[in-house]
Each structure stands twice: as C-alpha cells, then as structure tokens.
C-alpha cells in the first residue's frame, strides 16, 4: 500500500484551487467539469479538493465543514519551502489568515500557520536539517 492523495472538502473547489495557486504557487492540474472535484500539481502525492455536496454524497453521516468551524480542524496541510517568511506574506496577501507568524523551532526548522479562506489549516515549514 502507498499513500495516494488527500481530499479536503470545501465550499468552492475552483476558488480553492485559485487560492492555492496565488498563495502557494501550486497550479491546478485538474478541475472536473462539474466543479465538484479538482487537483493541484503537487508532485507524487496529490492534494485534491471536493465540494461539500460531494462530501455529503460520499459520507451519509455528514462531515465537519472547515469553513464553518470557529477553530481550525485537527489536521493540516504542510507545505515545505526554503523561505517561510516570504511564503507566509504571499499567502496573507492572497487572503489567508495568520494563526502563527514564522518562528524558528528548537530543532532549527522555521514554521508558520495560516488558515485559508475555505477554513483549511496550512503549515509552512522549512526543510528539516536546514
């Protein structure tokens, strides 16, 4: 078995793809004609988004909508970059909300936390060991 992809349910797949392109430089790889599913160009492992409506269809018991939660969900999307402060500012300019400004951790990694307009939690971090 191998890890294939992560799908986050969002209110507007197209807007989320556009935000991730502007904020993090990750272009859209695919958007279904229905607008209910899309993927980013993220390398070997896919980060995808699906509409809440598709989530409702897939999960008859319902799901927590990140954009309706006052607190970020207990899961994050971690993006690695050599320049966390610059990436953090770019994301803020694109509409992200700052949860924690960039700071160096005791193990030497620089880390920041943002909340996307769709409610998703994103960690920006420098590569380990740099």
Image: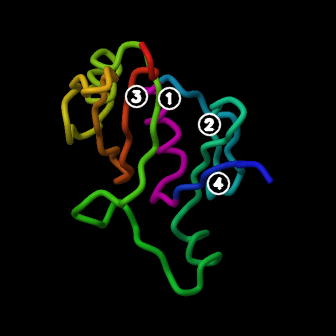
Tell me whether the residue at label 3 lies in contact with that at label 1, contact meaning CB atoms closer than 8 angstroms. Answer: yes
- Residue under label 1: 21
- Counting from the top left corner in percent of width and height, residue 32 is at 71, 50
> Which residue lies at the image location 61% right of the left edge and 69% below the top edge?
54
Q: Compared to 56, does 105 lie above or below?
A: above
The secondary structure that most of the magenta stretch takes on is helix
Tell me whether the residue at label 1 lies in contact with that at label 2, contact meaning CB atoms closer than 8 angstroms. Answer: yes
- The answer to which of marks 2 and 3 sits earlier in the sequence is 3
- The answer to which of marks 4 and 3 sits earlier in the sequence is 3
Q: Residue furthest bottom?
A: 61
- Counting from the top left corner in percent of width and height, residue 118 is at 38, 52
Q: Which mark is residue 37?
A: 4
Assess disc 1: are there few (<14), some (14-19) or many (≥20) residues with their C-alpha within 10 Å of its C-alpha: some
Q: Give how far apart the Cα atoms at labels 2 and 3 are.
A: 13 Å
Q: Compared to 111, does 59 lie above or below?
A: below
Where disc 2 sits, the SS reads strand
Q: Residue furthest right?
A: 1
Count of numbered circles in the view: 4
Q: Give how far apart the Cα atoms at labels 2 and 4 are.
A: 11 Å
Disc 2 versus disc 4: nearer the observer: 2
- The answer to which of marks 1 and 2 sits earlier in the sequence is 1
């Amino acid at each position: 078995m191998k890890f294939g992809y992560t799908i986050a349910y969002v209110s507007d797949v197209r807007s989320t793809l556009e935000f991730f392109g502007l904020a993090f430089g990750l272009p859209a790889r695919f958007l279904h004609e229905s607008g209910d599913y899309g993927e980013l160009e993220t390398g070997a492992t896919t980060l995808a988004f699906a509409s809440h409506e598709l989530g409702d269809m897939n999960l008859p018991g319902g799901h927590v909508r990140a954009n309706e939660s006052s607190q970020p969900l207990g899961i994050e999307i971690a993006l690695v970059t050599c320049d966390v402060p610059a990436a953090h500012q770019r994301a803020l300019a694109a509409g992200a909300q700052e949860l924690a400004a960039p700071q160096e951790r005791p193990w030497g990694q620089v880390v920041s936390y943002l909340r996307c307009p769709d409610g998703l939690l994103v960690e920006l971090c420098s590569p380990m060991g740099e």
